[in-house]
Image (cartoon, coloured by chain):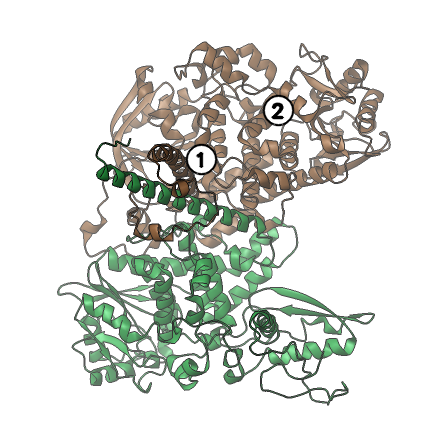
Amino acid sequence: QKYYHYVHLFLQVEQVRLLDRFSNKSVHGTLYLTATHLIFILHHHIASVEKLSLTTSGCPLVIQCRNFRVVHFVIQRERDCHDVYSSLLRLLRPVCYEELYAFSYNPKQNDQQREEGWQLIDLGAEFERMGVPCDQWQLTDVNRDYKVCETYPRDLYVPVTASKPIIVGSSKFRSKGRFPVLTYFYQEKKAAVCRCSQPLSGFSARCLEDESMLQAISKANHNSRFLYVMDTRPKLNALANRAAGKGYENEDNYSNIRFQFVGIENIHVMRSSLQKLLEVTGTRSLSMSDYLVGLESSGWLRHIKAIVDAAVFLTRAVTVEGASVLVHCSDGWDRTAQVCALGALLMDPYYRTIKGFMVLIEKDWISFGHKFADRCDQLDGDPKEVSPIFTQFLECVWQLTEQFPQAFEFSEWFLLQIHEHVHSCQYGNFLGNNQRQREELQLRERTHSLWAFLMSEKRNHLNPFYSPAYSEAHPVLEPSTLPYHFKFWRSMYHQFDRSMHPRQSILKTILTLKENSRKAESTLQALESVSTLLHIPPATSRLPHSGSEEDEQEEVGEEATESTDTERTVEGSSGTESRKQSYGELEGTYNSDLVKEEPAVVSLEFGVARMTC
Amino acid sequence: MSRSCCIINCNSRSHDSHGKPTGKEIGCYRITSLKRNCSSHVSEVTKTRRMAWIAAIQRPNITSQNTPAHRFVGSLGHITVKCKDLRVIQLEITGMEECLNIASSIEALSTLDLVSLMYPFFYRPMFEVIEDGWNSFLPQNAFKDLESMTDEWRLSEVNKDFSLCPSYPPLVAVPKDFDDETLKKVATFRHGGRFPVLSYYHKKNGMVMMRAGQPLTGTNGRRCKEDEKLINATLRPGKRGYIIDTRAINVAQQAKARGGGFELEANYPQWRRIHKAIERYNVLQESLIKLVEACNDQSHSMDRWLSKLEASNWQTNVKEILTTACLAAQCIDREGASVLVHGTEGTDSTLQVTSLAQIILDPGCRTVKGFQSLVEREWLQAGHPFQQRCAQSAFSNSKPRHEAPVFLLFLDCVWQILRQFPCSFEFNESFLVLLFEHAYASQFGTFLGNSAAERARLCLPEKTVSLWSWVNRPQELERLTNPLYEPNSLVIWPSVAPQSLLLWEGVFLRWNRSSKCLDEAYEEMVHIIEYNKELQTKVNSLRRQLAQLETEDPLLHTP
């Protein structure tokens, strides 16, 4: 509610029905349209609006959101519907960044707090943590004014032996000037993960500076005689690029490289794959067979597996063989970002913490110029540039959390929140396509940082099973990539279809229990201090050590459990109405009054609720 | 290895004292001997012995095709043992002759026909039986609970000598006003003599669920007035009921030609018939074989995995069964109607539906004891032919005609509900896996035989140990209880959307993946819950002590 005070109300339509996606349940209400929100939905979430043909009950309006929410309204009067429709079309296609929500969003923070929020993540400190600069790697100021590569950040790390002419020469031989730079340094073996774009080799072109650059990277690692060059594209795509004067490294021209294709498909394939997936899962009364066939033919999980496979390859090369790896694709900002980030996550437990994960995204995605504005369709742009590359990365991480439930400090709620805000445009972090653009937009001065907000909400995003000891024992994760380890991510693609999720959440229950334990510990301490004053024998008031069995069985027995205020959402009979249809066959019920709808309130799901009301 | 048979008291020898074969077909290998009264050592020995037994006799199924025993590398022979719990073991044995002997022994012993040669008859429990499981779930006790709720039903002894219906127990609950003579008439009208009996009484609204075999209407529409009167007696005045036929309508139509059929509207005007398409048991076996094959496929192709998973139809079967059970539960709880469930024989899909509906409706069935009681009532007593259905499991190259994973599918469906309501069940996944294992191969007699009649003939209570005797001991129960359990008195409605139903990895991928990480996370969860309980207890006890002091000494004030 509170944002309505600040924003202008565009439209108000009474008597609107909101239909459930998978059942016949519906809710009546009033639809409000403001400059930035549609009732509870941010415009920037909206991927498409569709007006369906008129029905007896009114004019239907279907809105598909980028956070995979699908909303189906029925508006009584057709004129109202058309008004809403045309307003939405206008509103969800902003032409300049200043129209985005981030520039009007005000969480009532002063400038200092805002500034502190932006300072939370410091990439210089991150490279220091990795052990860079060191005797083999140094910070270069060659891109200080974004002159060598405008989609790279200002601060870049290169081998000490790579002189400026080599860098500049190499950048001229690489697509969009994205020459090889360091993204992760595996200190234990002094092995480096570097990234770049494809070489402009065509069929026969070569560049001595580029060859020296790779040589320098290879030489910076004394543990290995060769350097892996991972082209994350399918070989066919790379071959096709040669005709356009691009292509891949010729092993004959580069000394001591081992070249490898990985076979991740391009942004267009990924876009249509997700579209197919959503079409299938959005079908009402979907049969198991159609679901599995659709899952297969969409290819979505195949693509996810390809990315994890590539990351596993990278991780093995670095941690087992101790070799340095250079990763690229075409422009080096989509597949390269996916593989480098996921690989680092497998190698370094720090990136599996909440803070570390923010750093990872900031480094490999934001600073190295993943084109968030284009890929997430922030402005009215080219629909062919839109692609769920970052969503795939988050899904890969989720797949790993399923295999290693104790290795990550965060739960899937954290991933969902990040996904939510990549699209909400409520915070400045993901606006624009690269650092240079962000500086021009003065995002640090004019918008707020998502990381500060997520940090303040940290408790909600914790994984209760996280064990730092596990990370110590298993610094490098070795996931299995057998097909059956990849599952459909229901919490992402059906986040807002509540009826599909387990009615009781283990995660929520255990989080609540942990919270209760924390409270109980402090209560116990308070009581303890009182009892010491009263000289109660301390034996019974000691803070229990986990796992220790103490002789208090007698007391346990007679104790009334007064303070077990565990809030559990036990849901039983609720939700039947929405499921009535799926069990089927009861269309002609004898008691018609049984079919009547339960009075219901629009329930606000995690994430969206806080943001809007 | 010595050369006497490992069956206790068998004493047959395949080799003479010099280690030369005596020429019989079966080569015998004694795995280890049991010494009596050697306490600490004994249990270990027994365990090894039992393992060996289970591996050698009950679970594996070696066939000439899948035994690469004939493949030798030097003097090494290889045996592939495919177990009933879906594990695949590779053995490497030195010596060609030894290897062949072991292979043929296992092969012969794993295909024993005679029930009385089964392991439960030789197994001696090494634990103290606190409560004899054979007496834990007697029908008369279950009926006492029913009597406390309603007086409309009576326990009939009409099937005392199993003559009326060979697959029913001696005691069945029927409407009070129907005498045994009428029941006899109804039994002739139902498949296998399975006349309608009470399966579940819904306390909340007094509605009931009954189950039966298909009516024998045949092609000329035979009717039976007594049958009609019997099921009508369960209806409230002016109310109608639902008949849930677990077969698709065309399948039910075809059944007429073989003397079966379904209730015609004209003769049962107060009932509405709904057809659902749960597959017949022989189709289910195909489905299991394909699924297991898909799970053991080690190729790295995602498309291949998904298409094989789809082609197996296993998840489709899970969805169909669960949907039908939800429908039955919905008729009872939401529509306030009584329900009669049947398929063809009334011993497979019927039981899946009636037992799952009870899990949904009755919180009692979600406890450890309640679930045992449910399995006892709705599966063992109700005459699910375990012996026939759970003989060979998924790996079998001879196709046993009656083999089918009907019970496994039921357990899978329970697991699906458990996943969706993880706090509403007193037991955990391990309990379901345990039941799966013991249904197929067990040292206990519980799942032997095809019906109550057969079990009585085999004198199982006297000659074997009940699984429940073993399970219902504190040390076992601890492993099988769900730490998240919080009694939930509500009806629980699971989602049957394909996106909500998962592959039961705990059974089908159990041997193909490392569960270490998952197990550790589970232990961490148990730890968090116990720590919380401990803290709460301490806080309460301290509060109480302070309160006590306060009352004793009014001058003291605590915060």
Vertical placement of B244 versus B254: above or below? above
Residues A525 and A248: in front is: A525
The C terminus of chain B appears in which quarter of the rendering?
A: top left
Residue at image point 29% right, 54% down: B491
B172 w.r.t. A445: above or below: below
Q: Is residue B193 above or below residue A289?
A: below
Residue at mark 1: chain:
A
Q: Nearer the viewer, residue B421 or A587?
A: B421
Q: Nearer the viewer, mark 1 or mark 2?
A: 2
Q: How would you rate the neighbour count of disc 1 (Cα within 10 Å): few for under 14, some for 14-19, many for 20 or more?
A: some
Which residue is the site of mark 1?
A68
Q: Quadrant of residue B167?
A: bottom left
Chain B, hue in figure: green
Residues packed near mark 2 inside 10 Å, few (<14), some (14 to 19) or many (20 plus): many
Dot 1: element: loop
* In this picture, residue A533 sits left or right of residue B271: right
Residue where numbered disc 2 is placed: A363
Q: Residue furthest left?
A: B237
Q: Position of residue B95 (x, y in %)?
A: 78, 75
Q: CA distance from mark 1 to mark 2?
A: 26 Å
SS state under label 2: helix
Relative to residue A234, is residue A362 drawn left or right? left
Amino acid type of the residue tagged 1 in the rendering: Phe
Q: Colour of chain A?
A: brown
Residue A18 placement, left or right of B294:
left
Q: Looking at the picture, do discs 1 and 2 lie on one chain?
A: yes
Residue type indicated by callout 2: Lys
